[in-house]
Amino acid sequence: MKKLIFITVALIIMATACRNSETQIQFHIDSHELYPEAALLVGDSLYRQTPDTSNTFVFRLPEQFHPTFGAVFFGQKHILLYMAPGESTGISVKMEGSKVVPEFSGKGAKKNRYLNETNLSFTPDFKLNETDFAASLDKQLQQLYKNLEAQGFDRTFNELEKKRLKYTLYSALPEYRSEHLYAINNGRYEMNDVYFQTLADVFTEDEDMLNMSVYQDYMKKMVSYIAIHNMPEFEDYRYVREQLDYVTTRFKNPVVTGFMVDAIISEYIGRNGIDKLAELEPIHRAKVTDPKKKAAFGELCNKWRRIAPGQPSPGFAYRNVDGQIVHLSDFLGKYVYIDCWATWCGPCRREQPALAELEKKYAQKNICFVSISCDQDRAAWEKVVREEKLQGIHLIADEADTFMNAYMVAAIPHFILIDPEGKIVNAKMTRPSEPETEKLFSTLKGL
């Protein structure tokens, strides 16, 4: 029966391919475990699908696209995939314990078997000096190239796969920066210029590779490490400007340049808000031409504008340990200092003694302290709150956490301060342990 399903999927693919030029990826899971959704990642696009009654997911790709690598994700698992226009593919997955065993059909079946069966494991010798380490990577890469050529694949696939192999293997080069210090047990050793030059020499601007995560990761780390190397001491905004200077003066391909400029500026704005937007936005506007990236950057900035000081705070309706629903509006008339945390978060837990001191010191003031947990295990959260007798108001976020999303809480602990009118004082408030927190409290009117 299992084999019959796989044959049926393959026949459907061939019949569909004969009728039109649409490229389909049909993905079948042979498992008792239910997967309500699977996703196909192709470049910057993520296609989501729900299964039919036979536990098969069907993805339809645009008529025109360049041959590329991608991946099918289901649960915590994924399968590498090569896709080319007009080459529909069938994948049938069996689960052997936690191991994923895929079978492929369609024109690209042999290539996809190669992708998922080729062993890329390699243990670099981080004790080697910079020059010898780079040579060891190149030697390993040539062996992988030789294995690829022996497969008899077409030139288009081989050229793309050589690039994937190169950046997969050379992902060890950025790691060398820290691993070498550990391997030689010398924390004071400073990388020489040969290392940073090798980082740059390995990299080639190639817009066709931008949809590969290994290429993106290498490029981002290369630019980051070279920028830090050029700085006498680290400062976040200076770090951003060093990266932008390197990219805008060294990169020649406008598409690759635009990708990196967007990544650098968007990451900084995402972390720090729009205080430096006047300086950064003109660079983004001049270098980034992709409409999707421009729109995403505009929305990111608008999110920060919506949580700027003086704006009405987004609301929440969360349950406390007794199961009662508590709204943000319940605290109108008081300042609200909000701690976004989790029981498993070490830095969050280390802030709690200082938070308890604040709660005690300001108990008679016009301020309340609200802790919102993002724990998924409600029982674990309740146990900590009750057994440790945590003070203040304790709530737990639900799955549709629009409040933390609105505040772009990407890391915890995260603190927020809201005034008695429900307006934002600071969307990224200082921590309880920082002296600046009480200094700011001392300036609040009506506290």
Image (spheres, rainbow, N blue to C red):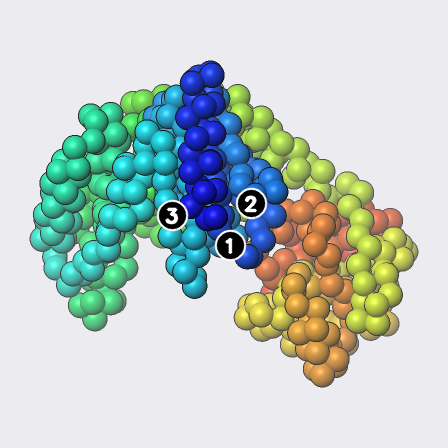
Residue drawn 62% across the image and 51% down it: 409
Task: Pinpoint residue 442: horizontal percent, then vertical percent.
Answer: 75, 61
- In the picture shown, does residue 278 fall above or below 345? above
Label 2 to label 3: alpha-carbon separation: 15 Å
Label 1 sits on what residue type?
Ser
Label 2 to label 1: alpha-carbon separation: 9 Å
The front one of 72 and 238 is 72
Label 3 sits on what residue type?
Pro
Residue 157: quadrant of the picture: top left
Q: Would residue 409 be found to the left or right of residue 19 on screen?
A: right
Q: Would residue 42 be found to the left or right of residue 130 on screen?
A: right
Identify the disc placed on residue 31: 1
Task: Pinpoint residue 392: horizontal percent, then vertical percent.
Answer: 78, 71
Under tag 3, what secondary structure?
strand
Task: Pinpoint residue 62: horizontal percent, then vertical percent.
Answer: 48, 22
Let me know if residue 243 appears in the view: no
Residue 323: quadrant of the picture: bottom right
Instruction: Tell me which numbered mark, 2 or 1, is placed earlier along the sequence.
Output: 1
List the residue tagged with mark 2: 55
Label 2 sits on what residue type?
Asn
Q: Would residue 340 be found to the left or right of residue 136 on screen?
A: right
List the residue tagged with mark 3: 102
Residue drawn 24% across the image and 52% down it: 119
